[in-house]
Structure formats: C-alpha cells, structure tokens
Amino acid sequence: MGIWRMRRYAIGLAWAYAAYVILNIVLFTIKNPPPENSAEMIFGVVYAVCGIAMTLGTAIALTRRRAELGPQDRALIASKTSVSA
C-alpha cells in the first residue's frame, strides 16, 4: 500500500524486508541439509539471487525516488494543509 500510495514509510519497510529476506535465506541455508543434487542447488542459488535482487532493488529504487514520495500519513497531510490555509 505504501508503494502504491507513494508514502515515505515504504522506504523503511522496503529496507527492513530486504534485510529479513537476506537473513531468512542465510539462516535457511545454515539450518537445512545441503541439496542432494545439482538441480536442487541451481534452484536454491537462482531463488536466493532473485529474492535478494528483487527486494534490494525495490529498496534502492524507493530510496532514489525519495523526493517523489509523499508524507508518511494522512495526519501529517492534514496538519500541513491546515497550517498553510
């Protein structure tokens, strides 16, 4: 919702989610046994690369477009419009 509505809180959530994805993939790799064959290994590598690239890419894109993002919530919008009016 934050990305669709172009809210600034989406930046923090995107970075937090990217960190979660990286941590989850690393911990999954450590906790579970290694793949039994090369097909499983290839799948795991492709999954990890795509998962990390997509989440980091989103966080980076949002950070670069920070100036285009609006206020964090409606209360802030309301306070700005009432002050300027």
Image: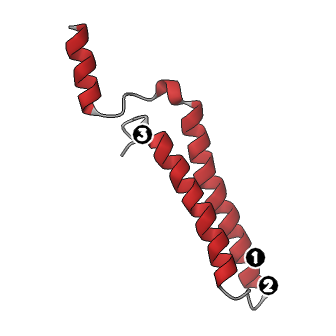
- Identify which amino acid the numbered label 2 is placed on: Ser
- Identify which amino acid the numbered label 3 is placed on: Tyr
Foreground: disc 2 or disc 3: 3
**Rendering coords of residue 3 (x, y %):** 43, 41
Under tag 2, what secondary structure? helix
The circle drawn on residue 31 is none
| Residue drawn where x is 63% and y is 69% of the image | 25
| Position of the C terminus by quadrant | top left
70 shown above or below 37: above
6 shown above or below 47: above
1 shown above or below 83: below
For the residues labelled 1 and 2, the Cα–Cα distance comes to 6 Å
Q: Which residue reaches farthest right? A: 38
**Rendering coords of residue 39 (x, y %):** 75, 83
Is label 2 in contact with label 3 (beta carbons under 8 Å)? Answer: no
**Rendering coords of residue 62 (x, y %):** 54, 37
Pick whichever, 36 or 74, lies toward us: 74
> Pointer 2: residues within 10 angstroms few (<14), some, or many (20+)?
few
For the residues labelled 2 and 3, the Cα–Cα distance comes to 41 Å
Is label 1 in contact with label 2 (beta carbons under 8 Å)? Answer: yes
Q: Which residue is mark 1?
A: 42
In the image, 52: left or right of 16?
right
> Pointer 3: residues within 10 angstroms few (<14), some, or many (20+)?
some
Q: Which residue is mark 2?
A: 38
| Residue drawn where x is 79% and y is 84% of the image | 38
Q: Which residue is mark 3?
A: 9
- Identify which amino acid the numbered label 1 is placed on: Ile
18 shown above or below 26: above
| Residue drawn where x is 62% and y is 77% of the image | 28
